[in-house]
């Protein structure tokens, strides 16, 4: 794809790649394997972004965060281990979902991604090198596990931290990565705070019931 007004070819943005995948798929269902094959060429970031995207939406169904959190953690740990591309069991790759459901997820997340992409560019290479990427992978894995937590009101900040980290990985943008790191640390602190509040409330209720 050419940059507007130039003859220079550029790699499609994350938003463009997701749109082509979701709206260009000709069949009624799309397998997990097909999704991985289309996104893996851009590394781990796009697949993590797609998994985190539906959990960022306010209309996400209950329990979706737990479903998405574990795959995000597994894929992020593969990045930490230095695997060249994401790996999933054949049984998982063979599963499929309705293409229309995928389009709904992409359609819902596009406004956020497109706004953020306007300011993304390669910078702060100290946060985008191989070692930094593995450290970011560790943080994403931790956030993915925390995303599966049942503590209320915590999934949105965790999801957005993962989304920002994924976009930083995709575009090699160290500034976006640093924003994602800060957001991830804040999300962890918020989860700990909400866990303490929930435990105090539960302890008080149990104490009053006895």
Image (cartoon, rainbow, N blue to C red):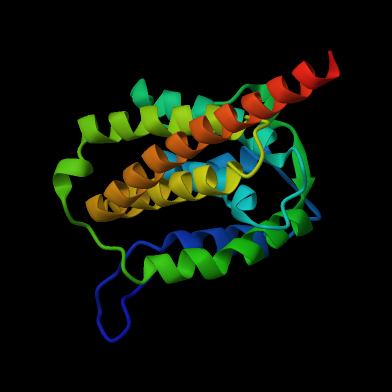
The answer to which image quadrant residue 93 occupies is top right
Residue 42 visible, this orientation: no
The image shows a total of numbered marks equal to 0
Is 168 on the left-hand or right-hand side of 46?
left
- Where residue 29 appears, as percent x and y from the top left, is 78, 49
The answer to which image quadrant residue 90 occupies is top right
Please tell me which residue is depicted at 49% across the width and 39% down the height of the picture.
190
Compared with 152, 61 (above or below) is below
Is 7 on the left-hand or right-hand side of 24?
left
- Where residue 36 appears, as percent x and y from the top left, is 56, 40
- Where residue 77 appears, as percent x and y from the top left, is 43, 24
Compared with 155, 202 (above or below) is above
Please tell me which residue is depicted at 25% across the width and 79% down the height of the picture.
7
- Where residue 55 appears, as percent x and y from the top left, is 63, 48
Q: Quadrant of the C terminus?
A: top right
Is 34 on the left-hand or right-hand side of 42?
right
Please tell me which residue is depicted at 77% across the width and 24% down the height of the picture.
205
Compared with 2, 127 (above or below) is above
Q: Which of these two is toward me, 97 or 76?
A: 76
Please tell me which residue is depicted at 72% across the width and 61% down the height of the picture.
104
Residue at the far bottom: name it.
5
Q: Which of these two is toward me, 68 or 89?
A: 68
Q: Quadrant of the N terminus?
A: bottom left
Residue 192 visible, this orientation: yes
Q: Which of these two is toward me, 9 or 155?
A: 155
Residue at the far top: name it.
210
């Amino acid at each position: 794809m050419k940059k507007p007004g130039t003859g220079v070819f550029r790699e499609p943005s994350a938003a463009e790649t997701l749109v082509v995948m979701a709206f260009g798929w000709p069949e009624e269902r799309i397998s997990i394997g097909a999704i991985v094959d289309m996104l893996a060429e851009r590394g781990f970031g796009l697949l993590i972004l797609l998994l985190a995207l539906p959990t960022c939406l306010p209309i996400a169904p209950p329990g979706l965060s737990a479903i998405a959190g574990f795959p995000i953690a597994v894929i992020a740990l593969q990045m930490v281990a230095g695997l060249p591309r994401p790996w999933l069991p054949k049984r998982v790759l063979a599963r499929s979902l309705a293409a229309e459901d995928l389009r709904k997820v992409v359609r819902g997340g596009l406004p956020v991604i497109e706004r953020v992409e306007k300011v993304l560019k390669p910078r702060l290479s100290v946060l985008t090198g191989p070692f930094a990427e593995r450290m970011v992978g560790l943080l994403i894995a931790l956030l993915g596990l925390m995303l599966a937590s049942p503590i209320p009101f915590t999934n949105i900040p965790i999801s957005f931290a993962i989304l920002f980290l994924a976009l930083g990985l995709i575009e090699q943008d160290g500034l976006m990565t640093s924003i994602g790191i800060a957001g991830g640390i804040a999300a962890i602190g918020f989860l700990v705070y909400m866990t303490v509040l929930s435990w105090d409330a539960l302890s008080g209720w149990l104490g009053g019931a006895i």
